[in-house]
């Protein structure tokens, strides 16, 4: 099965490579600007497709399977073409069947299931079209974009955009599969299958694909000496990014809870830890959440105030205090299964909810299995959400199956918003 998948990917890779112009040197890295929608807390980016070229805003899903866009409202392109069933491109997807085109009943188009995690899933047809993206030298983007003539994407109905940030027309997935953007771009431009993610809560963040460096205000965040590595864990058929977590500490003191919840359950695949740009805050299985919040309240040694949903522990900003880094609160350490530690400090822990109130930015995700209708539940014990990864540089190395991370960049006097988007 693995051999067949590799063979199909080789055919797919070849179809992309022969269509990429070789008249100029291939770029070593590519870059996208990322912004945060203040109303939905979703992270968005702008892509360019079609002939003639059209810019479109889409929501970023780090574990998503596809690039999908609304094709019902004004998608017109002379270079758009369907991906047919029984082709290598279709075989690399989680195809759910075939649909017949309206213009040619002998053509059967590859049908897949694009997902909007904020509303629902539906069926859509796999297509190809030209895709433009800016190269980067790691310091700035280049003025002239490069193109991939046959980049796969899913044509979705307009109803699927429900719940997305205003002005967006789809989602771009960066998931761990062969048709998501990281794999397709690395194949098209022959650079390593890896990408970096650096989110900002108040300005421009950045996603880059390909070879290092990435420099933020003079700081080489991709320097191997500054990255901590941990293995990425496969959880088929999911395209999301899972890591091994064995305990949670608050200021070096372990929080007591049932740590078997952090492992995957064989019977249903529930459990484990994943990284998400869809969840705005880190969510924890109910018993873990209660234990962590109780331990944190004890560690803070300051009176709580009335909680503000969805949070469970809130404080007066005056009782917390600040340093030049941010809120002066105990750190939370995620102790990974390879004994590496992901430390989360004040700026990534305390959410300003207004009226001089700060809340611990953790959310109760519900029990780890279905209990009853109307009761929220989770399939993942720990979901590291967007707020906790802001101003942390994450390097997803798909080729080596590992995650590199820097912890917070703020103590190094830089932020994810410091990438210079002035084109050269």
Image: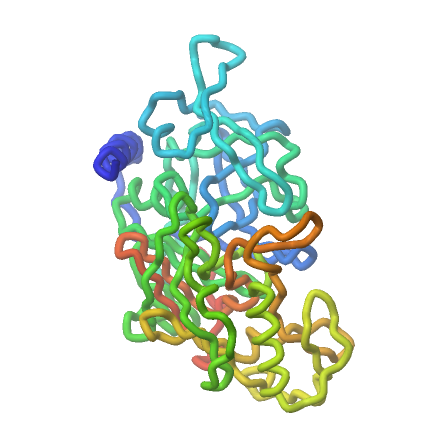
At horizontal 73% and vertical 78% (from top left) the residue drawn is 357
At horizontal 58% and vertical 85% (from top left) the residue drawn is 329
Residue 383 locus on image (x, y percent): 52, 61
At horizontal 50% and vertical 34% (from top left) the residue drawn is 53
- Choose top left, top right, bottom left or bottom right for residue 409: bottom left
Residue 400 locus on image (x, y percent): 26, 56
Residue 118 or residue 134, whichever sits in front: 118
Quarter of the picture holding the C terminus: bottom left
Q: How many marks?
A: 0
Quarter of the picture holding the N terminus: top left
Relative placement, left or right, of 413 versus 321 is: left
Residue 215, relative to residue 177: is it above or below? Answer: below
Observer able to see residue 344 = yes
Residue 285 locus on image (x, y percent): 56, 63
Residue 351 or residue 129, whichever sits in front: 351
Residue 349, relative to residue 82: is it above or below? Answer: below
- Choose top left, top right, bottom left or bottom right for residue 123: top right
- Choose top left, top right, bottom left or bottom right for residue 319: bottom right
At horizontal 71% and vertical 88% (from top left) the residue drawn is 303
Residue 26 or residue 40, whichever sits in front: 40
Observer able to see residue 218 = no
Residue 44 locus on image (x, y percent): 56, 51
């Amino acid at each position: 099965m693995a051999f067949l998948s590799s063979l199909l990917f080789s055919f797919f890779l070849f179809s992309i490579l022969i269509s990429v112009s070789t008249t100029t040197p291939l770029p070593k890295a590519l870059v996208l600007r990322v912004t945060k929608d203040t109303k939905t807390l979703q992270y968005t980016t702008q892509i360019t497709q079609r002939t003639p070229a059209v810019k479109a805003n889409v929501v970023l899903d780090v574990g998503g399977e596809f690039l999908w866009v609304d094709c019902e409202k004004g998608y017109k392109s002379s270079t758009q073409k369907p991906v047919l069933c029984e082709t290598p491109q279709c075989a690399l997807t989680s195809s759910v069947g075939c649909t017949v085109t309206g213009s040619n009943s002998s053509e059967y188009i590859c049908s897949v299931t694009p997902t909007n995690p904020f509303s629902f899933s539906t069926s859509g047809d796999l297509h190809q079209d030209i895709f433009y993206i800016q190269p980067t030298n790691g310091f700035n983007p280049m003025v002239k974009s490069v193109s991939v003539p046959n980049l796969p994407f899913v044509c979705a109905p307009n109803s699927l955009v429900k719940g997305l940030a205003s002005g967006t027309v789809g989602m771009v997935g960066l998931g761990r599969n062969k048709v998501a953007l990281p794999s397709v771009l690395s194949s098209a431009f022959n650079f390593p299958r890896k990408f970096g993610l650096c989110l900002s809560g108040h300005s421009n963040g950045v996603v880059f694909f390909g070879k290092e460096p990435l420099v933020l205000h003079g700081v080489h965040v991709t320097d191997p000496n500054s990255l901590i590595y941990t293995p990425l864990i496969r959880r088929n058929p999911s395209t999301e990014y899972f890591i091994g977590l064995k305990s949670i500490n608050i200021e070096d003191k372990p929080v007591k809870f049932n740590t078997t919840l952090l492992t995957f359950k064989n019977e249903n695949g529930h459990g484990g830890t994943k990284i998400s740009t869809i969840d705005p805050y880190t969510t924890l299985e109910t018993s873990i959440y209660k234990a962590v919040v109780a331990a944190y309240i004890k560690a803070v040694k300051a009176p709580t105030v009335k909680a503000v949903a969805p949070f469970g522990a809130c404080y007066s900003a005056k009782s917390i205090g600040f340093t030049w880094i941010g809120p002066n609160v105990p750190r939370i350490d995620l102790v990974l299964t390879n004994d590496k530690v992901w430390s989360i400090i004040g700026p990534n822990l305390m959410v300003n909810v207004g009226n001089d109130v700060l809340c611990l930015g953790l959310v109760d995700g519900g029990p780890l299995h279905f209990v009853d209708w109307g009761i929220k539940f989770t399939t993942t014990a720990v979901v590291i959400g967007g707020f906790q990864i802001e101003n942390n540089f994450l390097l997803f190395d798909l080729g080596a199956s590992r995650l590199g991370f820097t912890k917070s960049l703020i103590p190094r006097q830089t932020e994810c918003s410091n990438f210079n988007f002035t084109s050269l």
